[in-house]
Amino acid sequence: MNTTPIEIGRLLRSSLTGFVAGCRVDQPSLPVFGTLVRVPIEDQLEAFGLVYDIHMDDDGLVRQLATSHSLPPEVIADNRNNRNMPVEISIITVGRRKTGILSHLLPGHPPVSLDVLYRCTSQEVRDFTTTGRLGYFRHILRAEELPVGELLAAHLEQARAAHRESGDPAWFKNATRELITLLRDDYPTLMSVLNALSDLGPE
Amino acid sequence: MNASIRDKNKPIGYIIGGSLKESLRARLIVPPQEVREGSFVVIRTSDWQFYGLITDLQLGATDPRFADEPSGERLQSAISDLLQGQTLFTTLEVLPTLMLERGPDPGSPEYAQWREKRGAISSKTIPVKTIPSHYAEVLPANEGDVAEIFGSETSSGYFRIGNTREQGHPVCIDLVKLIQRSSGIFGATGTGKSFLTRIILSGLIKEKLASLLIFDMHNEYGLDDTATDTQESVPGLKGKFPAAVRIVGLGRGASVRGQAPDFNLEFAQSDIQPQDIELLTHELNLKDTTPATLDALVSSFGIENWYSKFKAMKPGSVIQGEDGKRMPAPDSVETWALENNVNSLAATSLHNKMTRLFHLPYIVEQPAANGLNEIIKALQNGQHIVLSFGDHENDLDYLLVTNLLTRRIREKWVEMTNAHRSHIERTAEPRQLVVVLEEAHKLLNHEMARQTTFSTIAREMRKYGVTLLVIDQRPSQIYSEVMSQLGSRICGWLGDDDDIHAVLSGLAGRDALRGMLARLQPKEEVILLGWGIPMPLVIQSRRYDNQFWGELLGKTHGKVNETQIMKELGFQS
């Protein structure tokens, strides 16, 4: 259970519809694919987003080390802990909190570099996913370049767990129904999403 | 009957489209198996209530691939169920028929204004002139809705003919409207026409709305009978209404099922008119020369004597002349033909063909009693006549007798009505008369309808208080002009497309109703149609059994077997 805000990293670049944060490899709570995160932009404004990609670029030292015949564990640990290139976490913006009110609209302006990225608590996940009628799905479904089915499956799995904690097992069913409603005229996408959800298995 | 349909307040769908000309379309929100074609539904909008019939159910999908590829094998069952619920659906086609202004919610401030505007005028159903809005709820009609449209059994003149098929709500017919114009009961053989007719006739007798003249070709209606399929005893009308129903046997000494009738009917030879013979053209295989020969006979002997004189002639009878040559005898048909410039062969042929008539025992020179007057008197007095054909149940007897009798009665009713209307004699208005005609296509087919009295009755006799109740299994054989005059039509299963087409002729929404008619259950399921019926409806017809008689007459009638008695006493489940 996740009850306290956890700082993950700081923003590298951003736009209204998404942003990328950097963090250390040895970060104790590295977010996973589909995690709901937030970035305070200013005093009364926060952007919410879903992690859709995590990637790590190489550097010259890693390339050299990778070709070495034998690598002592302390060298590997040193490289990972002290590397210059951060782990990059890509996030799609799915909503905002303005003057304390959650909505699934985009924030008026994007977060700026080095703003702190937080992982949402279970309560924040429940609050965000029960605001309105799951309107944030539209941001995900519109992003054709993303692995929509996988992202939704990962997000719904985590959100389902958060709602289960609070005794609301029906949330997942309602979310699935909403997805079907939104995608019923798009057979390929809907089946891709539902296949991914089916792979989650029953809780 | 299933649970959800019984739940009066639960909508079964909502309107998603349609038009007044074609039907309305509604999205079904309950499983399709809970709704059936022909169901009576109510569509509720804020101010108006619409009444309609389900005429079709169609399976649909937002994308055909959802229907083509079963998702149950690929997806979790819960997700598959959700997918099917959202992408696969059933569309109802609803034929709107009537509408009723309900006004705003009685608890709202607008209601008082609406009431004030309407004044004392009470809402009443009118034929549908507009359509409900999108998303208007569709509900199965409840008992109150059915009573609102079809009337209640407790109201005078309303008679329960059956129940709605799914909900089992009582459905009544307005007997006054039923007899105000000619009506028809149709259905293929074995669909329960005779039972339904007995039920309706019982209702008419009980309500004392009209006198009935029943041409009982197969001796079914008057005395107790045995059902052909169940071999159970079927009570006749005479047994249940002994004082009101009179059984008439055809011919002197005739008996009906071994019992003596109340009186017998014979016709005098002088009653037979040339048109009665022409009516039998097909039956007797008469030739085109027949009308001319009959004209000559009437000219020779007069309208009252031509039949007896012609009967007395001897075709082919010859005598030997003074010159030894054989020549036609003076009493021969040939002699009469020669003297009256009639084709001898035509006259002889007509005589030969009329031999079947000459041998009929109920056409006599001098009837023992005036049965015809007895019948007319009984009908005027509010009694009901069941004319049993006894042993004379072939087509020739039926055609001849029904036409002879009905012609005389029609003349009498016209005379009485005219006398009443002219106020010369201050006579009472003649009692409403319903002529019940079985195997109607034999008398009302395309060839004969113009010649028989029955088509005249169907077309014109309403104003003289005489109407027909036509019972037939081949409505397509009945002349279209007669069919168009039938105000109420009660129809069981029909297998022939032409028959279905004929029953629906002249009705609004017949395309939608055709399928319903074709898919009726072969027994005890009938559709009510026509002017005398507020809206078309498929019903489960009432059963003609002890319970029916108990309800109609207020006590248990007929023999009850031991099992039934034990059951009623609670000793058996």
Image (spheres, coloured by chain):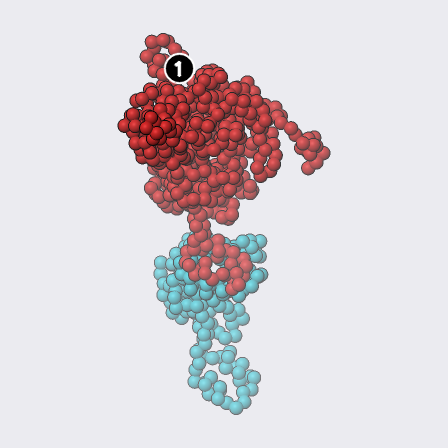
In the rendered image, the vertical position of residue B560 relative to residue B2, given as above or below? above
What residue is drawn where x is 52% and y is 28%?
B390
Extreme residue in the front direction? B323
Q: Nearer the viewer, residue B320 or B344?
A: B320
Q: Colour of chain B?
A: red
Horizontal and vertical percent for residue A93? Answer: 41, 62
The amino acid marked with disc number 1 is Glu
On screen, residue B454 versus residue A69, left or right, reads: left
Q: Quadrant of the N terminus of chain B?
A: top right
Is residue B261 visible in the rendered image? The answer is yes
What residue is drawn where x is 38% and y is 66%?
A144
Q: Nearer the viewer, residue A166 or B182?
A: B182
Horizontal and vertical percent for residue B131? Answer: 36, 39
Q: Quadrant of the C terminus of chain B?
A: top right
- Residue under circle 1? B429
What residue is drawn where x is 41% and y is 21%?
B269
Q: Colour of chain A?
A: cyan
In the rendered image, the vertical position of residue B481 relative to residue B311, given as above or below? below
Is residue A130 visible in the rendered image? The answer is no
Q: Quadrant of residue B329?
A: top left
Horizontal and vertical percent for residue A127? Answer: 49, 54
In the rendered image, the vertical position of residue A135 relative to residue B212, given as above or below? below
Badge 1 density bin: few <14, some 14–19, many ≥20, Cα 10 Å: some
